[in-house]
Amino acid sequence: MRSAVKRAATGALAVLAGTLTAVVVAAAPADARCLGQGNGNTMQVRYNGITIAQERQASGTCDGDGIYNGQVRDLREDGYAAQVVYVDGSYQGLVATATTSTWKNYRFYDQTGNNSAGIIFWSRPETRPEIPASTYGY
Amino acid sequence: MGHTLQRCAMGAVAAALAATAACANGPGDREPTAVEASIIEQMGRPPAADPDPAETEAARSEFVAACMAEDDLEYLGPPETPSLVEWLGLTPDEFAAEYGFGHSTTIDLRPAYEIATADAAEAFRARMEALPEADRDRYRTRELACLQESYAEFGLPENGTVHLPDDSPIDDYTAQAHEATADDPRLAEAARAWSDCMAGKGFDFDGRDEMGLPLQEAAVPFADAFAAQGQALVDAGRDWKDLRAADVLDAEQLAALAELQERELAVADADRRCAAEGHDLDAVYVEVYNEHLAELTAS
């Protein structure tokens, strides 16, 4: 079984414990997630017909340098944080947690040298974790 | 987003009409495309009576597959990954009754669940990576366009994720609806009534985040300890699926965890009872949000 332990901390706001690779970076305007260099989109997690969390790419991060700068926010005061987990080769870890509607910056360093990683984005135990295939070209 | 921009965005929607000079596009405030205008129109409508979300999403997948086939691309489909509640084979109500909010009460379930989810993510990524690079770029661009068309056709998913291009005006509408809802006195009144109800049951919270987030954060060290200590057992041949807190944590940790879980379950029970007594903040939020969204999209 893969890096199970690194992973086990994901549901536990491990970023608050400082155990993972997450780095909070200075504020920056943003667009979306990378779909190849220079191309991106945004994700909205919805629950009961309401958008409860969003993730997007920080401006200019889809540039092929192996560093993904993203932003996440939690739009609902529902007692749950919005969380972003990255899966990249044997790495799996929580890289961002947001608890308010203010955009929170995070950074993910490519672990495998291919500028491509899976993202899992979730918010509540009732919501399916979103796996948008991958972000690549970051 | 401020009121001026809000009005500009609304003018832009109504707009097959020309936008006024005052509503010239600014950052994040471009004209909606025809598909986006249809989505915005859908967003303001009340949900269809008793829609079956599973049927709707199956129809959406078929629609997206057909849309992508027009470009000679085979739709890889949305990844099939259950929520934690679904993975446990429970309904949301059953989950709440057994696990409360699921913060401290699921620490020994999450490793197996998250590993399964991560494996699904990695498998899906690998399928994407297997596409020729030119097709991969084409695939994602086309998928995004087809998903948008599906939102215009079926509305946004009730539960699930919406993918939108950069600077989509849809994001402006949802953000504005949230802001208007947060400022709506009906929500503040409902929160006060809920808070009073919770106080009557022995818990003092101003809002749901104040209730839930500390519990979520308090569970972190237990989850970390379970993961770290459980790994030794997994390395020795045990399976995460079969490990429970009692197999992994020591007596002192278990006692502290039990105390936290007891509190979480008590708070969650009080919250459910308040909802049953008419203080359902989620229900009020949804009602007020949809009303603001309808106003925004209709303007």
Image (cartoon, helix red, strand yellow):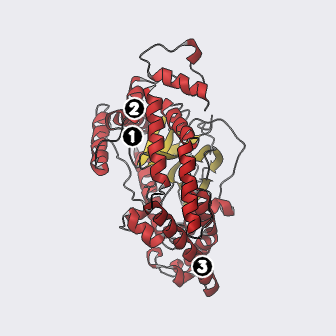
Instruction: Please rate how many residues cluster around mark 3, counting C-alpha atoms within 10 Å: few if below 14, some from 14 to 19, many from 20.
Output: few
Q: Is residue B55 above or below residue B145?
A: below
Q: Amino acid at mark 1?
A: Leu
Whole-number angstrom distance, CA of label 1 to CA of label 3: 41 Å
The residue lying toward the viewer, choosing from A125 and B163, is A125
Q: Chain of mark 1?
A: B
Q: Which residue is mark 2?
A: B39
Label 2 to label 1: alpha-carbon separation: 8 Å
Residue A67, position as x, y percentages in the image: 63, 45
Say left or right for B218 vs B180. Answer: right
Report the residue at 60% width, 22% height from top. Answer: B26
Measured as percent of width and height from the top left, residue A45 is found at 47, 47
Q: Earlier in the sequence, mark 2 or mark 1?
A: 2
Question: Which one is earlier in the sequence, the residue at label 1 or at label 3?
Answer: 1
Horizontal and vertical percent position of residue B189: 56, 49
Is the C-beta separation of discs 2 and 1 under 8 Å? yes
B277 sits to left or right of B63: right
